[in-house]
Amino acid sequence: MSEQLTMEERLWEYIDGMSTPEEKTVIDQLIEANAEWRAKYGELLEAHQLMFSSELEEPSMRFTKNIMEEIAVLQIAPAAKSYINKKIIWGIAIFFITIIAGFLIYGIGQVKWSSGSDGTKIPVDFSKIDLSPMFNNTYINIFMMLNVVLGLFLFDRYLASKRRERHKEA
């Protein structure tokens, strides 16, 4: 098989004019003397002439537009939310949130709040701070009620989407 390849390589170099003058004379003699070389030379020469004699067909000017119009007729792939399981995504999110919360709780638990760099305590006494006037404020109560109402709206939309999904399946 390698002999066949070397014969083809040498003949292609001969046809392309890339062989040395010594090789040209040797290949000329092989073509005249050997029927196999002569047949292969005729075959490769014919292929060479076909490559340069025929013109390649060019696509029409509207080729791209025609293809895009044909694709638009076909059904488009479904959106990602139709084939991605939301329970898996929620599970991954809960896992990472739990890990982050665990690291934060562990880190805060490792802090020695009573020790300072020079042995002094924190200059602010948190036991003396009274937060009750802040939470008795009307604005805070309105803010909390607004958050509760928005949370209920969000929960309602979630239930409505679940209801729509069940109706589509049935």
Image (spheres, rainbow, N blue to C red):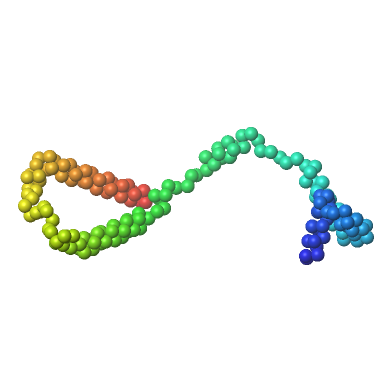
77 relative position to 36: left or right:
left
Residue at 12% x, 40% y is 139
Q: Is residue 3 visible to us here?
A: yes
Point out the image quarter for the N terminus. Answer: bottom right
Q: Nearer the viewer, residue 148 or 167?
A: 148
For this view, does 108 lie left or right of residue 94?
Answer: left
Classify residue 39 by image quadrant. bottom right
| Residue in the foreground of this view, choosing between 79 and 26 | 26
User: Is residue 34 depicted above or below 18 in this figure?
Assistant: below
Residue reaching furthest to the front: 118
Residue in view at x 19 percent, y 44 percent: 147
**Residue at image point 7% right, 49% down:** 130
Can the viewer see residue 94?
no
The structure residue drawn at horizontal position 16% and vertical position 60%, both measured from the top left corner, is: 118
Q: Position of residue 127 (x, y in %)?
A: 7, 54
In the image, 117 versus 69, the foreground residue is 117
Residue 21 percent across, percent down from the top left: 88, 53
Q: Percent x, y for residue 61?
A: 64, 34
| Nearer the observer, 117 or 96 | 117
